[in-house]
Image: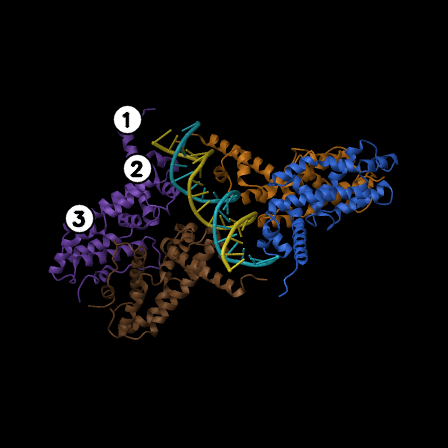
Chain colours: A brown, B purple, C blue, D orange, E cyan, F yellow
Amino acid sequence: MTPLNDEQLHQIRDERKEQIIRAALSVFARRGIAGTKMSMIAAEAGISHGLFYHYFKSKDELFTTLVQQAMTEALHELDNIYAMPGSPLQKIRVLTEAILDEGGKPYFLLIYQARTSDGVPEQVKQLMEQYSMNAFVDRLLPLFAEGQRAGELAAGDPADLIASYLSVLSGLMVLNAWDDANYKIPQTDMLLRLLTAR
Amino acid sequence: MTPLNDEQLHQIRDERKEQIIRAALSVFARRGIAGTKMSMIAAEAGISHGLFYHYFKSKDELFTTLVQQAMTEALHELDNIYAMPGSPLQKIRVLTEAILDEGGKPYFLLIYQARTSDGVPEQVKQLMEQYSMNAFVDRLLPLFAEGQRAGELAAGDPADLIASYLSVLSGLMVLNAWDDANYKIPQTDMLLRLLTAR
Amino acid sequence: MTPLNDEQLHQIRDERKEQIIRAALSVFARRGIAGTKMSMIAAEAGISHGLFYHYFKSKDELFTTLVQQAMTEALHELDNIYAMPGSPLQKIRVLTEAILDEGGKPYFLLIYQARTSDGVPEQVKQLMEQYSMNAFVDRLLPLFAEGQRAGELAAGDPADLIASYLSVLSGLMVLNAWDDANYKIPQTDMLLRLLTAR
Amino acid sequence: MTPLNDEQLHQIRDERKEQIIRAALSVFARRGIAGTKMSMIAAEAGISHGLFYHYFKSKDELFTTLVQQAMTEALHELDNIYAMPGSPLQKIRVLTEAILDEGGKPYFLLIYQARTSDGVPEQVKQLMEQYSMNAFVDRLLPLFAEGQRAGELAAGDPADLIASYLSVLSGLMVLNAWDDANYKIPQTDMLLRLLTAR
DNA sequence: AATGAATGAGCGTTCATTCAT
DNA sequence: AATGAATGAACGCTCATTCAT
């Protein structure tokens, strides 16, 4: 009866969905929700705009879903840092590179968009209030505290140190999103100087 | 019913124009050209949206004008730094604070918007190609070179150092535009560590 | 894997067609052509929306076909009344009940939709001009005239009487289509009072 | 300062609003909310579709507003009947004519649309549950009871009598909305026979 | 025959811009 | 100069229809 069997259909659906998600993520991350037109997502995914709506209910719904995913992913990313080998400073180096890595993770960018864009869905606003930057800072507190005890990191309130560092990385990430030759992402060594005392 | 004389009329025109420019600058800087609605500019300037068109041909034209002004202003700002008293590092500190200063200078922000926003007028695109970041770097080269000679700044290609530093500042500026409690602008002392050798 | 012979195939086709027609008729009758989505017909018929187009060229074409059928059926229905036993009034009672009977004949409803809906195909519009209400009135003229002669029906122009009565029935049918508790279909006895003189 | 004074502006606004309301009412009443396209309202009101949104927030909002008004108006209309001179039957005659009167009151029609259309806003659905047909029946109960006592009206449950009569009128009204020559609204005398005993 | 993925015309709504006053 | 009424291009989304399998 069924001309394409269930498995094939499922596969097509999953691929398309993944394809659209990738496209949307990359566009949303760079341009925010208001700056992203459905035609951009459709073009990036190589589909007609109509097809989008076979897979997702609306632009807002997809954006919300992606932000939720991004939140989880980003926090996981932070947690994972503890499993890495090396000293606290070495771990921070890895984290730094992960965040700034070109194609790396648009998740952090999407979170920036969710925090600052106009016209974000109500649900996203709530999510952003729920998961303030503190959630991120808290995850890194043990690592930075350890680094301070080891004398690898500058002294002072570790929460401030983390928040400042993450802000610098976020800012660079935002610029980096446009891979505009006008902006130069500093070398990791240079960035780590922000954290290390004289 | 004394009609206003030409001079008075001129003055009114100029004041209104200035008023609109200030309003538009502050909105454009934060939201980019696509994210800015004419109603926002009108509201911020305290005029009707219709009146806007007595003073400017279009949103695009005003944006273009503002970007041109911003380019000039920003470059002047850099030049002015040389007139300040103090060591190179002290001058850089002043510059840093000027750029990050809250209400300070939306010019730098506007340039960021001009570089990255959607829907920027063609003329602005050309302007951005013409005045690449190099224009900024070049202005600061003597200052940084002097700082390096004085041993105040880290060694290495000064152009890279400048570009990296400006990028960090730009990134922070962008975050700062939203005065979101989630982002913390680092203390100037901390930022200067980026530039100073161990 | 015995292939089905031609006759079996034909039978399947005919059954499917009938199934779709029944589904479409019930939905079109209630919602009109514009208010009916292809997905409704497909769901009601228990088929995929794609299959519909193996049997009919378009929604418009099916609607047109159905209206044509409905015209014929409805007129036959009126003719059949003559074969019923009983006095003219008794025959009219039967007709009344047939028209208002819940699941009874959506044909009359479909004709209402064809007369009043938006977006009816051109061909249907022509059909409606061709078969005006007069066609219906004419069929009933002998019956009503007989009823008047028998003193069962009120005096006056029988054509007017018929047109009025059919209009009342049509109106009730339209309300009835929504089986909304808010509307109450009068008892047949009550309706017949419309036709009987004091 | 103001080129058109407040009064003039107010007048223009009020006229336009009234003009749009009239247009929308007439279209909504005939075609329901889903069958009404914004272009129809705009065309009927003789304005551009864009202008509509200077006066009303959305199609749904206007529909809802109109239904609310219609509810109030319709119930008032029923109440007013008591102030009329004459016997109960004479009052019912007036009411009948008011409801069926051609350009008369599209309010009753709009209520029909609100009850039966697809895609009515949630608020309207609630309104319709709140004000069931009973609200209408209740208003007429004293009148009909009096008519029965006076022997002018047929015996039986007066609530049923009213509901049936209103349903007949509603049905006719719906047909009448299309002023299609195919449907003939019966004379009031004829309709009143529904209510009068032999 | 049958499915559902895919397309694109069209609708509701927003917003930059024009124009009568 | 100043206002806000008015217009229409463009966007998000729905749905009839087509097509690969």
- Crowding at dot 2, Cα within 10 Å, few <14 / some 14-19 / many 20+, comes out as some
Image-quadrant location for residue A168: bottom left
Chain bearing tag 1 is B
Element carrying mark 1: loop
Point out the tag, 1 or 3, that comes first from the N-terminus. Answer: 1
What residue is shown at x 71% (from left), y 45% (from top)? Answer: C107
Residue labelled with disc 3: B80
Give the number of the disc on residue B5.
Answer: 1
Residue A89 is left or right of residue C105, and the answer is left
What residue is shown at x 76% (from left), y 43% (from top)? Answer: C76
Q: Is residue B71 visible?
A: yes
Q: Quadrant of the N terminus of chain D?
A: top left
Q: Amino acid at mark 3?
A: Asn
Closest to the camera, between mark 1 and mark 3, is 3
Residue C119 is left or right of residue D99, and the answer is left
Report, in whole angstroms, how far the alpha carbon at label 2 lies from the one at label 3: 26 Å
Q: Position of residue A111 (x, y in %)?
A: 38, 59
Closest to the camera, between mark 2 and mark 1, is 2
> Do marks 2 and 1 share a chain?
yes
Q: Amino acid at mark 1?
A: Asn
Residue labelled with disc 2: B17
Point out the tag, 2 or 3, that comes first from the N-terminus. Answer: 2
